[in-house]
Amino acid sequence: MSLRQMEYLVAVVEERSFTRAAEALNVTQSALSHQIKALEREVGGRLLERLPRGVGLTPMGRAYLPHAELAVRSAELARRAAKAAAGAEGGELHVATLHALAIGALPTVLARWRREFPGVRLHLHEYLTTDELRDHMDRGVADIAVGPRPEGWEGPVVSLGEEEILLVVSRHDPLAGRTEPVRLAELADRAWVRCVLEPVIGGRRWLDWVCARHGFRPLTAMEVQHASTAVRLAVAGVGILACSVDVARAAVGAVTVPVDPEWRREQTAYSRVDLTGAALRFVEMCREGLFDGATAGGGPRSAS
């Protein structure tokens, strides 16, 4: 089996169509079909099946696909790494991260990158959960991941610093008038807006873990997928929210309240291979300024 055959299989699965995959790969549909059939003969069974709405994977195909994806993307990572190590100008860099970081801390770094390295094209891959982020990095989707420290990761991991976590409330919430930080035990009877991208610590979601240390279980007012949605619900008064200072500052009308003791969460950059060239420079840029100015200071603040 060849890398090209694996690439063709991945393209058909992503496009859910032989026709669209052939167009994306710039080959004829007959050549694509021929290579897929040759691959199926070599593995000893059908990998794809035609469905009412496109093309899907057989059970054998589902077992084979992750390995094909890893091979194809590893080859692409190797090409980009070699080009970067050779000092070639231009090229591209793929960065995977969580949605909350993509709308919070990362935009300033991405803007600086565009100013300083306009010849290197950035591709941003966003994921809702840390498990999704790690899974796609395992499959070779990106050159670098930016997110919480991955447990047991075998490649390089670089600490980027700690992001501060604040409370977000509406302007009409009693906490909005506080002049001092809020102790978590005071919030035992309050309802929270929760986000599915919440990190997991010791098998428990982060807020559950933190509140348990203060003797209570947080009440849930509503659970959503996106951090941006969660902030808007907190601003509207649906419940209180714990989120990063950068996400809170991006929301119009949000009032942020620090907690005592401070909540801080480490963020890292990690990769499957040694950091070189553009990847290394991007990580250095993140270390220089990703969480600069992310300190809460005194009492409540409006993000408007």
Image (cartoon, grey):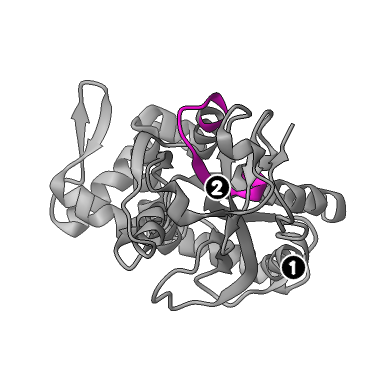
Identified at 49% across, 35% down, the residue is 230
- The three-letter amino acid code for the residue at tag 2 is Cys
Q: CA distance from mark 2 to mark 1?
A: 28 Å
Q: Nearer the viewer, mark 2 or mark 1?
A: 2
Q: Is residue 285 visible?
A: yes
Tell me the residue that label 1 is attached to: 281
Magenta highlight range: 234-247
- The three-letter amino acid code for the residue at tag 1 is Arg
Identified at 50% across, 28% down, the residue is 233
Identified at 44% across, 45% down, the residue is 128
- 191 lies left or right of 256: left
- 80 lies left or right of 207: right
Tell me the residue that label 2 is attached to: 243
Q: Whole-percent x and y of residue 44? A: 13, 56
Q: Which quadrant is the C terminus positioned in?
A: top right
251 shown above or below 60: above
Q: Whole-percent x and y of residue 135? A: 38, 58
